[in-house]
Amino acid sequence: MLAITAGAAPATEKATIPYDKLDELWQKLAQADASKLVASAQILSKNPGVKPAQIKLVIRSAAGDIPLRVSAEGYIGDFPRTEELRKENPPIEANQPKGSLRLTIGVELAVPPTTTFSYARLVDGIAEAIKFMKAQAGGPTAVEPTVQAVIFLFPKSGARKATIEVGTTSGQRLLTADTAGQVKLLIKPTLAGENPQVTVSERPLHLFIDSE
């Protein structure tokens, strides 16, 4: 993951992000399997009093302003990617003071379209993520990252309610979301061979890779 923090400036000056900072990630990810990996960009305020939902982002293009969607968790959605914007590289302006925001960009597993899917889907997604991370780190000689788990992030309404059920040959394993709506599912080689079905009570918002 890459964190970008703007330097200190007068409160009247708004925070901006160059368009190409975000577009670069999507361009790199074009080399990966889009059915397994997706780009992730989260913007948060360093001021604990400012919630992600209060952050507004607008691409200030010469052709007209383009508002960006920011989720309740601060994730940027529906990022427009066109040759015109790439050539222009307009600023993405926030309604917050410069130096007050932190942008984290990276990749995560694609969320399956159904609430039941094979364990192999997670394992294959992790393999694709490791290949992508190695390529970005310097090719086949780079140290392979270790992935220990996948973190499911459910909507806030699913906190302490959303569940993951893994149907192994030794029995059903049921995990429940914590107060933040997260469930950490450990990835085990033994289960990769068995390939059990994974059932979620509702589709998660994100599938984060827990790596070292």
Image (cartoon, rainbow, N blue to C red):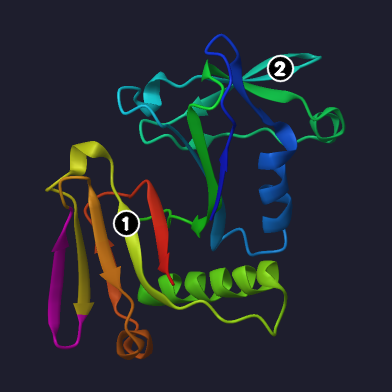
On screen, residue 8 above or below 4: above
Query: Which residue extends farthest top?
Result: 12
The image position of residue 138, as x and y in percent, is: 72, 73
Q: Earlier in the sequence, mark 2 or mark 1?
A: 2
Residue 136: percent from the left, percent from the top?
Answer: 68, 66
| Identity, as a three-letter code, of the amino acid under mark 2 | Arg
Q: Mark on residue 152?
A: 1
Residue highlighted by disc 2: 60
**Magenta span has 87?**
no
Which SS class for mark 2? strand
Say if mark 2 contacts mark 1, CB within 8 Å.
no
Which disc is residue 49 wearing? none
Image x and y of residue 115, in percent? 31, 56
Q: Is residue 51 left or right of residue 99?
A: left
Query: Looking at the image, can residue 79 be seen?
Result: yes
Crowd band around label 1 with a 10 angstrom C-alpha radius: few (<14), some (14–19), many (20+): many
| Quadrant where the image shows the C terminus | bottom left
Q: Which tag is nearer the camera, tag 2 or tag 1?
A: 2
Whether the magenta-drawn stretch holds residue 169 is answered as yes
- Quadrant of the image occupied by residue 157: top left
Magenta segment boundaries in residue numbering: 168-177
For disc 2, the neighbor class at 10 Å (few under 14, some 14 to 19, many from 20) is some
> Which quarter of the picture shows residue 59?
top right
Q: Along the line of sight, which residue is nearer the eye, 24 or 101? A: 101
Residue 180 left/right relative to 160: right
| Residue at 25%, 53% in the rendered image | 182
